[in-house]
Amino acid sequence: MSLGAEIERFFLLDNGSTLTPKLGATAVYSGIDGSGLFGNLTAGISLATADFRLLDLGLLFNVGDDGEKSVVGRAGASRQF
């Protein structure tokens, strides 16, 4: 069983670019193999320019029921042609 939500909002900048911050959270319960409760939090930001360039940054923070923790970062850049 899992429950999660993500919220994002885009802002149109004066130069025609859009800036989109994102926040999310998920909680999961699994009774298989004693996994128990675990979850994650996400945060990110995207910048899309008027000439189709995209910069995407994000963080993922995981927490397990036995105290395990991990952090993952990601970055991406692309251009549409």
Image: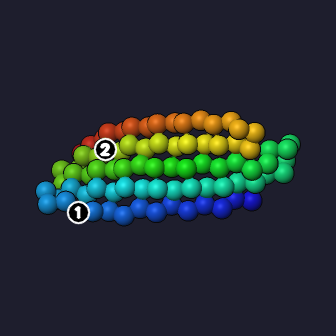
The image position of residue 65, as x and y in percent, is: 74, 44
Residue at the image position 75 percent from the left and 39 percent from the top: 66
Label 1, label 2: how far apart the Cα atoms are: 15 Å
| Crowd tier of the residue under label 2, counting other residues whose Cα lies within 10 Å: few below 14, some 14–19, many 20 or above | some
Could you tell whether 38 is left or right of 50 in the image?
A: right
Pick the front one: 57 or 63: 63
Colour scheme in use: rainbow
Query: In the depicted view, which residue is nearer to us: 15 or 68?
Result: 68
Image spot of residue 22 (x, y percent) = 42, 56
- Badge 1, how many Cα within 10 Å: few under 14, some, many 20+? few
Residue annotated with mark 1 = 12
Q: Which mark is residue 55?
A: 2
Q: Secondary structure at mark 2?
A: strand
Left or right, 44 with respect to 17, comes to: right
Number of numbered callouts drawn: 2
- Quadrant for the C terminus in the image: top left
- In the image, residue 11 lies at what x, y percent? 27, 62
> In percent of the image, x 66 and y 62: which residue is there?
3
Query: Residue 13 or 63: which is nearer the viewer?
Result: 63
Dot placed on the residue nearer the N-terminal end, 1 or 2: 1
Task: Check the picture and name the quadrant holding the N terminus.
Answer: bottom right
Q: Position of residue 44 (x, y in %)?
A: 41, 49
Q: Residue at x 14, y 60 (%)?
A: 14
Could you tell me if residue 38 is visible in this image? yes
Q: Is 32 left, or right, of 9 in this rendering?
A: right
Question: In which quadrant of the rendered view does residue 26 lie?
Answer: bottom right
The amino acid at mark 1 is: Leu
Amino acid type, mark 2? Leu
Contact check, label 1 and label 2, Cβ < 8 Å: no
- In the image, residue 70 above or below residue 46: above
